[in-house]
Image: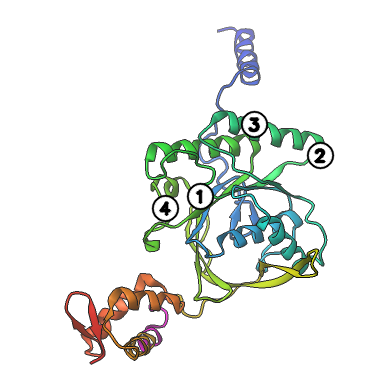
């Protein structure tokens, strides 16, 4: 073939890449040495899809707002580097709770200054409806065009509020939600963080179809500790990075304003420095967990009436120990004769 013809073919191919929707090809191990970029190093990757889930009242939304405010301000989170960018928070439950929580965070962390790069939509966006997803993308594009700043993080709080009338347990419906999130991620290049509820059995993960977890680049579980203002953050999936260690985080109360009657209005915000999880499970501290379980059982028996495995497990969980290891700890004590089985579910001290 003449050399001129070869050049024409190459030129035409190059033009077709520019003028059509052809996929971009990468060769061999090209890109192997690229490092994963993060919004919060070691915790929150860029251009990714993930979930933070927990039971009702577990402080999962407070944690999501802690990340949102840190990314919006560029303030270090848990001693980790933060990449500052605009954040969009879809507050599906609406109401005045979210702005008050942001105000409390600003009071505690940035001397009450405005969190300028954090924006809210104060109503659900139904991700099963393509017109609402399109409206969301148009809103984002309009803002980015006006202010010349891209959104790096979009938080959906909660999945249930933005799921519409679809069924969370159906893989088909969950995949449709995931596809909508993927569309937003592809067009904005932002990280999508979904705040979600745990199932009836918290040990089995987030509520609904397992398709959600399968699609995640990262996943975190939030566990509230007793009745205290603190929670445990557990990384349950990190596809392209090491899983962050389990840590404990506390919440602090602030007065956000004074109402017309002169009454102070309070709100909470999560502190950004975690503490070592000294007893996340009995694998790390088996003797302490076993001793604690014996004391818990004796205390429950002092109130009279039988003690069931279920009730003791709940007490064990409330004390801050991982329920994942309850059965192993209890069975070990039964085998040692330090706890007795009575019937199918009842247990007692020897």
Query: Pointer 2: residues within 10 angstroms few (<14), some, or many (20+)?
Result: few
Q: Earlier in the sequence, mark 2 or mark 1?
A: 2
Q: Earlier in the sequence, mark 2 or mark 3?
A: 3
Where, by quadrant of the figure, is residue 149 drawn? Answer: top right
Gap between marks 2 and 1 measured at Cα: 29 Å
**Residue 135 marker:** 3
Are the residues flagged by discs 4 and 1 in contact, CB closer than 8 Å? no
Residue at the location (55% across, 29% down)?
Answer: 130
Gap between marks 3 and 4 measured at Cα: 27 Å
Element under disc 3: helix
Q: Which residues are magenta?
A: 281-291
Read off the residue under disc 1: 217
Relative side of 266 to 49, left or right: right
Element under disc 4: loop
Front: mark 3 or 1: 3
Read off the residue under disc 2: 147
Gap between marks 4 and 1 measured at Cα: 17 Å
Front: mark 2 or 1: 2
Residue at the location (70% across, 34% down)?
Answer: 139
Element under disc 2: helix
Front: mark 2 or 3: 3
Read off the residue under disc 4: 207
Where is residue 231? Give x, y as percent: 54, 70
Residue at the location (61% across, 16% down)?
Answer: 16
Q: Quadrant of the N terminus?
A: top right
Element under disc 1: loop
Gap between marks 2 and 4 measured at Cα: 38 Å
Where is residue 271? Give x, y as percent: 66, 70
């Amino acid at each position: 073939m003449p050399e001129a013809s070869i050049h024409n073919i190459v030129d035409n191919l190059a033009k077709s890449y520019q003028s059509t929707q052809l996929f971009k090809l990468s060769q061999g191990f090209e890109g192997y040495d690229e490092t994963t970029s993060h919004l919060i190093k070691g915790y929150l990757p860029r251009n990714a899809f993930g979930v933070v889930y927990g039971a009702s009242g577990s402080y999962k939304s407070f944690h999501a707002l802690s990340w949102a405010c840190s990314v919006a301000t560029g303030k270090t989170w848990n001693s980790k580097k933060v990449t500052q960018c605009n954040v969009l928070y879809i507050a599906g439950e609406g109401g005045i709770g979210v702005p008050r929580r942001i105000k409390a965070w600003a009071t505690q962390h940035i001397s009450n200054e405005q969190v300028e790069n954090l924006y809210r939509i104060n109503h659900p966006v139904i991700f099963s409806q393509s017109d609402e997803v399109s409206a969301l993308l148009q809103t984002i594009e309009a803002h980015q065009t006006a202010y010349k700043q891209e959104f790096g993080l979009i938080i959906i709080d909660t999945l249930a509020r933005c799921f519409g009338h679809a069924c969370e347990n159906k893989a088909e419906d969950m995949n449709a939600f995931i596809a909508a999130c993927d569309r937003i991620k592809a067009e904005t290049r932002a990280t999508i963080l979904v705040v979600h509820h745990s199932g009836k059995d918290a040990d089995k993960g987030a509520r609904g179809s397992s398709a959600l977890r399968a699609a995640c680049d990262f996943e975190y579980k939030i566990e509230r500790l007793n009745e205290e203002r603190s929670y445990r953050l557990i990384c349950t999936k990190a596809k392209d990075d090491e899983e962050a260690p389990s840590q404990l985080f506390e919440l602090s109360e602030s007065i956000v304003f004074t109402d017309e009657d002169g009454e102070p209005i309070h709100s909470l915000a999560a502190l950004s420095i975690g503490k070592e999880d000294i007893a996340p499970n009995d694998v790390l501290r088996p003797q302490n967990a076993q001793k604690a379980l014996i004391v818990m059982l004796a205390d429950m028996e002092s109130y009279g009436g039988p003690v069931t495995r279920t009730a003791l497990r709940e007490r064990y969980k409330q004390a801050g120990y991982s329920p994942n290891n309850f059965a192993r700890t209890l069975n070990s004590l039964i085998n040692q004769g330090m706890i007795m089985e009575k019937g199918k579910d009842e247990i007692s001290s020897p």
